[in-house]
Image (tube, rainbow, N blue to C red):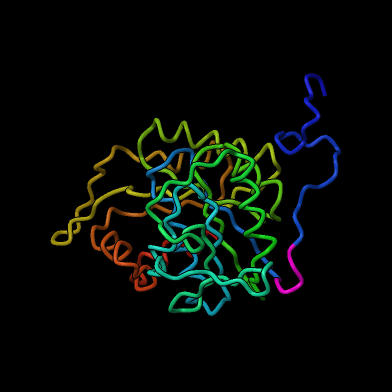
């Protein structure tokens, strides 16, 4: 390829080189791996990841969440396990933390003493940490693993796309047209890497008055359907603005989210 730097790990092209998939340890058997991505931050990607995990757990599936958002991990707080600490099994392997309903979680915040301290690491270290979460954590038998990725198309999403056996991704956006444009980059990145886009979630799509049921598109007209049609994304979910849900997540009780909000996502996976 013209202009090739011969550094395959930093390249999104597939030109016949060997696979960069990272093998898991013998004590782990993850059947389905679903990435949750967004073009920018602040659109509720971690919320969607958590709700997807809760939905599958309610179906009786064995579920895990790998928090690949190393510099901005929020999954442990959503599940109320931010004060827990992942333990070492034999000095090499790591045991994930289990939530109240048995969902397994691995996040950098479960390994450090002070979650308020910033993680000031360069890309290669971030990427290696994600690989370690896949390779060195004792996940056991898992039906569905959801990977919460950092926003954008940088080192960590590229590492997840290349190193983990993704069965597909779900893209999270919000109604603003600018965000839709940014999300197109995430979708195009997945297509370049031959990763199926399973669905599009438009978070904060509307607000429904609890008294009269009237819907208001507070953040502007929805572009989810036209974006999905443009990129041939098969499924769309639109989540409302729900102050009560935000409070539930802030309290670490995402597993108590009401069935109506969880069911809106069940067809995506």
Residue 162 shows in the view: yes
| Residue name at image x 60 percent, y 48 percent | 197
Q: Is residue 199 visible?
A: no
Which residue corresponds to the image point at 24% horizontal and 63% vertical from the top-left?
A: 244
Q: Is residue 197 left or right of residue 17?
A: left
Q: Position of residue 21 (x, y in %)?
A: 76, 52
Q: Residue 35, how many percent across, how many down?
A: 58, 53
The secondary structure making up most of the magenta span is loop
Q: Where 39 sits versus 102, above or below?
A: above
Q: Residue at x 61, y 71 (%)?
A: 88
Residue 17, x across and y down, in percent: 85, 39
Is 76 situated above or below 180?
Answer: below
Quadrant assignment for the C terminus? bottom right
Q: Which residues are magenta?
A: 24-28
Using residue 54 as the reference point, say whether residue 216 is left or right of it: left
Q: Is residue 34 left or right of residue 222?
A: right
The tally of labels here is 0
Q: Quadrant of the N terminus?
A: top right
Left or right: residue 80 compared with residue 214: right
């Amino acid at each position: 390829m013209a202009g090739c730097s011969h550094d395959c790990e930093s390249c999104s092209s597939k030109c016949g080189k060997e696979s960069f998939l990272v093998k898991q340890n013998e004590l782990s058997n993850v059947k389905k791996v679903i990435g949750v991505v967004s073009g920018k931050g602040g659109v509720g990607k971690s919320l969607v990841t958590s709700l997807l995990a809760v939905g599958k757990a309610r179906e009786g599936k064995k579920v895990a969440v790998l928090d690949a958002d190393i510099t901005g991990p929020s999954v442990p707080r959503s599940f109320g396990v931010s004060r827990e600490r992942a333990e070492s099994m034999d000095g090499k392997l790591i045991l994930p933390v289990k939530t109240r309903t048995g969902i397994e979680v691995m996040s950098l915040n479960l390994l450090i003493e002070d979650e308020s301290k910033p993680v000031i690491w360069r890309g290669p270290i971030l990427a290696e940490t994600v690989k370690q979460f896949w390779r060195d954590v004792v996940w056991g038998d898992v039906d569905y693993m959801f990977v919460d990725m950092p926003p954008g198309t940088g080192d960590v999403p590229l590492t997840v796309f290349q190193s983990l056996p993704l069965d597909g991704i779900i893209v999270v956006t919000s109604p603003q047209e600018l965000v839709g444009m940014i999300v197109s980059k995430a979708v195009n990145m997945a297509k370049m890497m031959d990763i199926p886009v399973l669905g599009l979630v438009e978070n904060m799509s509307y607000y429904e008055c609890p008294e009269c049921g009237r819907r208001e598109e507070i953040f502007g007209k929805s572009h989810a359907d036209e974006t999905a049609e443009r990129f041939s994304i098969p499924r769309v979910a639109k989540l409302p603005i729900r102050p009560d849900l935000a409070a539930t997540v802030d309290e670490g009780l995402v597993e108590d989210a009401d069935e109506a909000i969880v069911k809106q996502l069940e067809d995506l996976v």
